[in-house]
Amino acid sequence: MWERFSYYGMRALLVLYMIKFLQFSTEKSGQIYGWYTGMVYLTPLLGGYIADRYLGQRNSIIVGGTLMALGHFAMAFPPLPFFFSALILLIMGNGFFKPNISTVVGSLYETNDPRRDAGFTIFYMGINLGAFFSPLVCGTLGEKVGWHFGFGAAGVGMVIGLAMYLWGQHALLGDKGMKPANPNDKLYVPVVLIAVVLVFLVASAFQFSGYDIKGMVPGYIYKLLALAVAGGLVYSYASKSEKSTLTHVEKQRMAVIFIMVFFSVFFWSAFEQAGSSLTLFADRETDRVISLFGWSWEMPASYFQSINPLLIFILAPFFSKMWVSLGETGREPSSPVKFAAGLGLLAVGFVVMIAAAAMYQQSGPVSVMWLIGAYFFHTLGELCLSPVGLSLVTKLAPIQFGSLMMGVWLLSSFAANFVGGFFAGNYDAMNHTLFYMIPTGTAAGAGLLLLVITPKLRKWMHGIH
C-alpha cells in the first residue's frame, strides 16, 4: 500500500509538474512520462534476475524500497539535475521491488490452490488503497502548497512502507524468499548489467535535458546497450545448473506467459493514458467546479487519478468472491478469457471518452461524470486482467525462474508505457475524438484475437486454470 502511495502520488503530479513548473512542452512531457513509466517496467526484468540468482526476493525488496525513498526525496529539490537523478533512482528501485513483492505473495499459496486468484485480488486492494490516497495527499500538497511538498510526501510514504515491511515480514513469511531460487556465484554479471542500464538511463536524461546525445553518439550504440543486457542474461542462463533444465510442459507454460505479455501491451498502452492524456483532459476540458448549497470548490486535476483505485478498492472484494464462487462450481472462465474481457471493457471506457471529447467540441467543458464513467469501465477491465496476470505468472513459471518471469510479465508495461507516452505526446496535435478512437480499436481488436487463440493456450497450460 505505502509503496504504491509513493509511486502514484509522484505520478499524479509528474506531467502537470513538467508542463507548469519546468515549462516543458506537452510533447516533451509525454515523452519523458513514457520513458519513465516504461523504464519502471523494464528494470524489473533485471531485478527479478538478480533476486533469483544472487540476492533472494526479500533482500531485493529492501534494496528497491531504499532506492525509491531516495528518489522521491530527490524530487523535492527544484534543480533539473535532481529531477532526472530522482527518476533514475525510482526506475532502479522499482526494478528491485516490483517483481519480487508479487512473487513473494505467490509463494504463500501452493500449486492449484483455488484461493490464489482471490488472494492476489486482495493484494491488489492494498495496492489501490495506497493509490487512492496518494493523489489526494500528494496532489493537494503539490498543486495547492508547492510541487516539492507533494514529492516529499511520496518519499515519506515509501519510508513508512519499508519500515512496516521490515517489522512484519518474518511473522508472515518465515524463511520464504530469503535465499536465491537458482543461485549463481558469477557476481560480475549483475554488475555489468546494472552498469549498462545506468549508462542508458543517464544518456537518456542528458538527451531530455537538451544535450544532443543522439547526435554525438551513433544510434547503433543504444541498440548495442540493449543487446548487451539481453546477452548477459542469456549467457548467465546458458551456464545454469543441470537442475534448471526446463521440461517440455514448462516450456509450453512459459510460452503462454510470453503470449499473455504480448496482449497485455495493448491493454496497458491504453490504460496508462490515465497519467497523461486523461489528466490533461481533466485539467483543460472538464468542468471541475463542484457547487453545493451556494458553496463551490474546484477539484484539482490530479484528484481524478484517485477514481480508479477507489473503484478497485470497492469492487475488488466482489471480483475476489466471484472468482472463488465460480471456481467452486466449475464455471470460472480461464485466464485468457478473463484477459479478453478486460480488453473489451477497456475499449468501452474509451468509447465514453470519444463521446466526452465530441461533447467538449460542441459545448465546451464537460461534466466530471464522463471521466468517472470511463474510469469505471477501465477499472472493471483492470480487475479482469492485472491481478489475474500476476497470479497466472506465479502458477505457470518454473520455481527457479519465478522472479525473472514476473519481470518478463512487467515487460508488457515497459513496452506499453513507451507506446502510450509517445502517443500521449500527440494529444495537442490531434482531434481528441479521433485520438480516443485509436485505443478503442486496438483494445477491442486484441480482445477478439485473444478469444480466437484461447483453446490453444488452455491446452498449453496443462490443467492449470
Image (tube, rainbow, N blue to C red):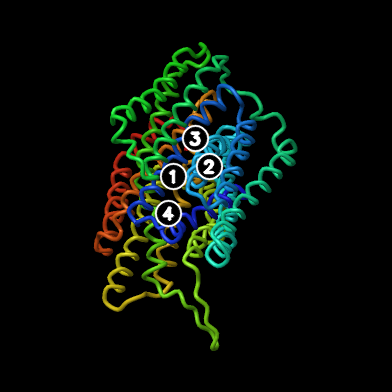
Point out the tag, 3 or 1, that comes first from the N-terminus.
Answer: 1
Work out how far the residue at label 3 is from the one at label 1, CA to CA, in angstroms.
Answer: 13 Å
Label 2 sits on residue: 90
Q: Secondary structure at mark 4?
A: helix
Label 1 sits on residue: 36
Q: Secondary structure at mark 2?
A: helix
> Could you say which disc has been placed on residue 44 in the image?
3
Foreground label between 3 and 4 = 3
Point out the tag, 3 or 2, that comes first from the N-terminus.
Answer: 3
Q: Residues within 10 Å of mark 2 (few under 14, many from 20)?
A: many
Work out how far the residue at label 3 is from the one at label 2, CA to CA, in angstroms.
Answer: 12 Å
Q: Foreground: 291 or 260?
A: 291
CB under 8 Å between callouts 2 and 1?
A: yes
Is residue 206 found left or right of 79 in the rendered image? left
Foreground label between 4 and 1 = 1
x then y, percent, for residue 135? 54, 60
Q: Residues within 10 Å of mark 4 (few under 14, many from 20)?
A: many
Which residue does the image show at 42% across and 28% down from the upper left?
Answer: 254
Point out the tag, 4 or 1, that comes first from the N-terminus.
Answer: 1
CB under 8 Å between callouts 4 and 1?
A: no
x then y, percent, for residue 419? 33, 45
Label 4 sits on residue: 381
Foreground label between 3 and 2 = 2
CB under 8 Å between callouts 3 and 1?
A: no
The amino acid marked with disc number 3 is Pro
